[in-house]
Image (spheres, helix red, strand yellow):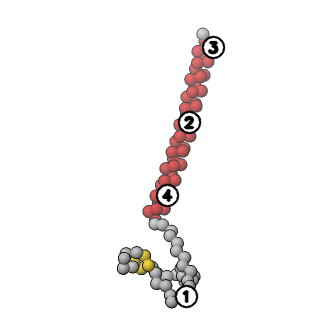
Amino acid sequence: MINGKKMKPFESENGFLAISLPEMSSSEVLVEYVGTKLMLVSKIISVMTLISILIYEFYKKIKKKDIIKKKNRKKKEICYLS
C-alpha cells in the first residue's frame, strides 16, 4: 500500500518485485508478506506432528508406570505367599 492505496507489483528488469511510486515528495509504503499455502500446510503438519509425539511420549510414560506397579504387586503377592 502506498499512502493507503493498493498498488499492483510487477517484475523489474533485474527479476525483483517492484512497484511504481507516484510523483510525490514523500510516500509511506506498507509491505505485507503473508506466505504461501504450502507454508501454512507445512506449519499445520509440523504442529500436528509435535502434538502426536507429545501424546505418544505421555502415553508411553503412563504405560511404563502401570507396568512397574503391576510388577510391584506381583512381588508383594509372592512375599505374602512365602
Residue 30 coordinates in the image, percent (x, y) = 54, 76
Describe the element under mark 3 as helix, strand or loop. Answer: helix
Residue identifier under label 2: 61
Describe the element under mark 2 as helix, strand or loop. Answer: helix
Describe the element under mark 4 as helix, strand or loop. Answer: helix
* 82 with respect to 20 (left or right): right
As rendered, which of 48 and 26 lies closer to the eye? 26
Which label sits in the foreground, 1 or 3? 1
Residue identifier under label 3: 80
Residue 77 coordinates in the image, percent (x, y) = 60, 17
Residue 29 coordinates in the image, percent (x, y) = 54, 79
Task: Tell me what residue is drawn at x 48 percent, y 62 percent.
Answer: 40
What residue type is disc 3 on? Tyr
What residue type is disc 4 on? Lys
Task: Tell me what residue is drawn at x 44 percent, y 62 percent.
Answer: 38
Residue 12 coordinates in the image, percent (x, y) = 39, 79
Q: Are marks 2 and 3 in contact (CB under 8 Å)?
A: no
Which label sits in the foreground, 4 or 1? 1
Point out the residue furthest to the right here. Answer: 80
